[in-house]
Amino acid sequence: MVHHSVAERRALARALTRIENGDLSVQDELRAAWSATGAAHRIGVTGAPGSGKSTLVSALARAWRLRGHSVAILSIDPSSPITGGAILGDRIRMRELSGDPGVFIRSMASRGSVGGLSAAAADAAALLDAHGFDFVVIETVGAGQSEVEIARLADTVVVVEAPGMGDDVQAIKAGILEIADVLVVNKADRPGARKTVAALQAALDLVPQTSGHHGVAGTALSDAALDAGWVVSVLQTTATAAEGVDALVDMLALHREWLHVSGVGDARRRRRYSQELRVRLREQLLLRALQILGGDGYDAALREVAAGRRTPLDAARELAAQLIIGSEL
Amino acid sequence: MSELTQAPVNDAAAGTPQPRLRILIAKPGLDGHDRGAKVIARALRDAGMEVIYTGLRQTPEMIVDAAAQEDVDAIGLSILSGAHNTLLPRVIDLLQAAGMSDVPVFAGGIIPEEDVPALMQAGIAAIFGPGTPLEEIVSFVRARTAAHC
Ligand SMILES: Nc1nc2c(ncn2[C@@H]2O[C@H](COP(=O)(O)OP(=O)(O)OP(=O)(O)O)[C@@H](O)[C@H]2O)c(=O)[nH]1
Ligand SMILES: [Mg+2]
């Protein structure tokens, strides 16, 4: 359990801003922090809008605090695609954590690009991790691919569902069941909770227990081999009354233990680093390529595509071949 | 001008998002009504800003704590309870103690004309009465945070 001074917390907050802004000066902090990452249990929490993720994260944080652990929370909400603005409201449900020096909460807007968000969220999680927080929780709204990307930043993924959202079980509909290590039916005080649990259990039986942390190409172990031996269970919570939260805390600890003992944790981290490295490599290669080609080379290729003479892929291949001596078209 | 300098390059260089203004909007005091705060939050969002909305019944300590963690460029407070003469100066004092006096604080809601001079004196950057056009608030925030973005 760490204690940061007011000044340290300010410095951390400012570094997070520079990460969000893509300000490269923050690389100094990241470089210094990098070797200290890896100690935190990173937990991704995702699920349909309004299922109670923030309330649950708040209750979880309280439970961890009672056990003497420190907690950092990264709450990610979408930016408006039209104006680029955002209303980040997750703190409303985390009121009870306010003023606790063992808790640090940061709201983050997705700012449009999925790749950019993953990179920023990865760096933010690393920085929080290196600051000595025992738990780093990343909350995202589970509606699509970007959430799956973000969840991949975590050691353990919790998918939160709520009853009474019609006949559909959102997690099943959104196709995010496969990424769950733990499923939670929150709002267990509401009617229909048992039905939702049953629907999730039934759906889980159909998901090959490979878990959805699909590796990027080039990682050694298959998903099936990696994730063998962990059985996803469905827990019920009433976050507003902190009910069922202790059981969730225990389940998360159990998953972490399993990650460690099975070696899956290391494999997942390698996949995570591989993912981050690829995102960065792609970005750096592109920047270099554009520098070398210059405006004219790029524009010439663009004209070919626009005029219908080249497909985008063919034009890109030709550009790449110009850049890299000895490469094939 | 080359196409290179335009959007495609930025899209592709996914690691370089644009800086955005981050504004904390909070509702201190005990009354349970935050319609005004929400209207301002939406207006700032529609102006392209990122609004951290903390909701009702925020103490000055909570507000400054959140502002520090969120590293905001400005703080907007909506006050209806009549406790503005204690709450607002307290926020200013706490910001100062946290080394954050550079973060402008503006307030809206029901604040009697005669209280305004003392609050401005205490360090509140602007006070917007009921019916202030939203554009005026947006322009104020833009102007006061011009150096940040
Ligand atoms: N009855 C009941 N209501 C709950 C429970 N947990 C959360 N809520 C309520 O559900 C609403 C949404 O809760 P949030 O925690 O904001 O949900 P969220 O999933 O974080 O929402 P987004 O971040 O907007 O996607 C709030 O009104 C909560 O008070 C619960 O266990 N039971
Ligand atoms: Mg939330």
Image (cartoon, coloured by chain):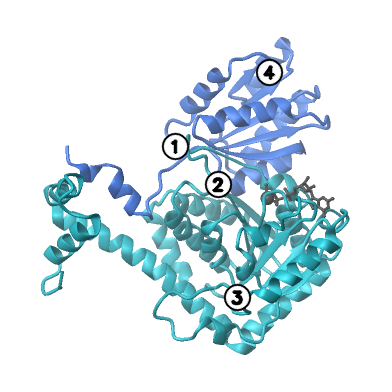
Disc 1 target residue = B148
Q: CA distance from mark 2 to mark 4?
A: 40 Å
Mark 4, secondary structure of its residue: helix
Q: Amino acid at mark 2?
A: Pro
Q: Amino acid at mark 1?
A: His
Q: CA distance from mark 3 to mark 2?
A: 25 Å
Q: Label 1 marks which chain's residue? A: B
Disc 3 target residue = A211
Callout 2 and callout 4 share a chain? no
Q: Residue at x 26, y 42 (%)?
A: B6
Disc 2 target residue = A78
Q: Of the residues tagged 3 and 2, which is closer to the observer? A: 3
Q: Of the residues tagged 3 and 4, which is closer to the observer? A: 3
Mark 1, secondary structure of its residue: loop
Q: Of the residues tagged 2 and 4, which is closer to the observer? A: 2
Q: Label 2 marks which chain's residue? A: A
User: Is A48 positioned to the left or the right of A214 in the image?
Assistant: right
Callout 4 and callout 1 share a chain? yes
Q: Amino acid at mark 3?
A: Ser
Q: Amino acid at mark 4?
A: Ala
Q: Supply the letter of whichever chain is blue.
A: B
Q: Quadrant of residue A232?
A: bottom right
